[in-house]
Amino acid sequence: MQSVTVTVNGQQYQRQIEPRLLLSDFIRHELRLTGTHVGCEHGVCGACTILLDGNAVRSCLLFAVQVEGCEITTVEGLAPDPEVLHPLQQAFWEAHGLQCGFCTAGILMTLIPFLEENPNPDEPQIRAAISGNLCRCTGYQHIVDAVKIAAEKTRAEHA
Amino acid sequence: MKPAPFSYFAPESLNAALELAAEHGYDAKLLAGGQSLVPAMNFRLVQPTVLIDLNQVDELAYVRETEQRGLRIGAMTRQRSVECDPLVAEVCPLLAEVMPHIAHPQIRNRGTIGGSLVHSDPAAELPVVAVALDATLTVRSNSGQRRVPALDFFQSLFTVDVAAGEMLVEVEFPPWSARTGYAFQEVARRHGDYALVGAAALVTLGEDGLCERARLVFLNVGDVPMEARHAAGMLRGQRLTEELIEEALNVAAEEEIDPVADIHATVAYQRHLARVLGRRCLQEAEARAQQIVEGR
Ligand SMILES: Cc1cc2nc3c(=O)[nH]c(=O)nc-3n(C[C@H](O)[C@H](O)[C@H](O)COP(=O)(O)OP(=O)(O)OC[C@H]3O[C@@H](n4cnc5c(N)ncnc54)[C@H](O)[C@@H]3O)c2cc1C
Ligand code: FES
Ligand code: FES
């Protein structure tokens, strides 16, 4: 067993874990933050995407022991309070950017840094950004629409 | 879908990592970005009893210009850092252009240049670029280091010239003549997927507009990057007419690659793709070289 201390969504956690514990399982089973989903456990589906020190990464391809001292954000860390959605979540709600929602957390966490870097993305850029996230329900069109709405709103707010 | 147990070490210096690698030999695996190794461990295709995590070895993450205006890149440099580094775009534009073809942004945020070169998937882009650009790889152990030309580094399927106890520490891309154009193209079923077939080309033009030097390397039509040496030789000293390129690609696609049929593509289709992608790459590389010669 090894000790790991990590900050998740602004809160510090310390746990004793086996080195082979995947970060995705650490987040879901040890921290009980089940918003992060696990689809494939080999990096293909994108459902487990989280932010590690601000970068979107696959949590199923990291061991929890590797994130000692790091800052992690999961989907639970997006909304400012239980009654108010994050602007990107709000846009997904408005544009029907999700159906079953299994892929949604991973897609949101992929898009947060993407929109920070590209506040005014065109459609090919949006599709490239989410190319590493599989969605079996929406056909992606409404996800793309949601990203456009979110980008527009954010730009309007900052204008 | 869970990895087998292992002992975990996270050394903070290269020397400490090399000591651990020497001590544990074949029992140990080096963990770089984990984007190929961890899936394999999750499937239990690989079950190392010792994992040496290189992610704290900061001294292996760098991009530097050499005195000859080439590039030296540390093995632990993230693929995403290579992609976004203005120095790479300026000094080694082929490398910069290839990076977005590798997997997805989330994978490139973790995946390293060294990990991709050592993993040496026949469908991976970086080994092809290393061969195309005449890169030299530096391999180190706790008893010394050696420099290996890319062409010798990739030995066979998923096998490179790195022994147990050794580590790839750096890859060096030498400069090419200023009048060199480059191109990379691949066909994949989805953006970010491993490619069915790909090609990289470099064309150096002389002052007279004739081809001074050419390089053509294919991806995923053999166990290792497939260099079409005879085809490139046919172009030397010549004007790159459509007919000549066609002739050279017949040689490349029929004699210099070694495709194996799989569920995605027949051998005939892979040869066809090699021909088409090879032609497009040579033409694009020549057009870019032409622009440089004409001073645009
Ligand atoms: C969904 C998905 C899609 C992908 N698509 C592509 C693609 O289109 N093209 C592509 O090229 N790749 C693709 N990859 C693979 C990706 O580029 C990996 O990052 C890369 O193959 C391995 O790099 P890594 O740093 O993650 O290495 P790791 O996975 O950590 O290591 C890979 C192997 O190299 C060894 N190793 C690592 N570093 C060193 C070193 N410095 N010295 C000696 N040995 C070392 C490890 O022990 C291990 O055996 C994809 C991966 C995923 C999950
Ligand atoms: S569960 Fe991590 S990518 Fe699918
Ligand atoms: S909404 Fe169901 S998988 Fe995307």
Image: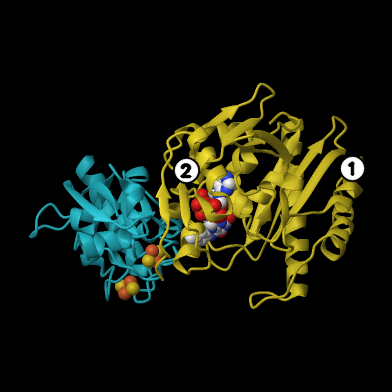
Subunit ID for the residue under disc 2: B
Q: CA distance from mark 2 to mark 1?
A: 43 Å
In this rendering, the answer to whether A12 lies above or below B36 is: above
Could you tell me residue B190's position as x and y percent?
A: 53, 66
Residue B116 vs residue B17, the one in the foreground: B17
What label sits on residue B236 in the rendered view?
A: 1
Could you tell me residue B94's position as x and y percent?
A: 64, 42
Q: Colour of chain A?
A: cyan
Which numbered disc flags the more N-terminal residue, 2 or 1? 2
Secondary structure found at label 1: loop
Observer-side mark, 2 or 1, equals: 2
Is the residue at mark 2 in contact range of ligand 1, meaning its CB lies under 8 Å from it?
yes
What label sits on residue B54 in the rendered view?
A: 2
Q: Quadrant of ligand 3?
A: bottom left
Q: Which chain is yellow?
A: B
* Quadrant in which residue B156 is drawn: bottom right
Secondary structure found at label 2: loop
Image quarter in which the N terminus of chain A is found: bottom left
Question: Furthest residue to the front?
Answer: B23
- What amino acid is labelled 1 in the image? Arg
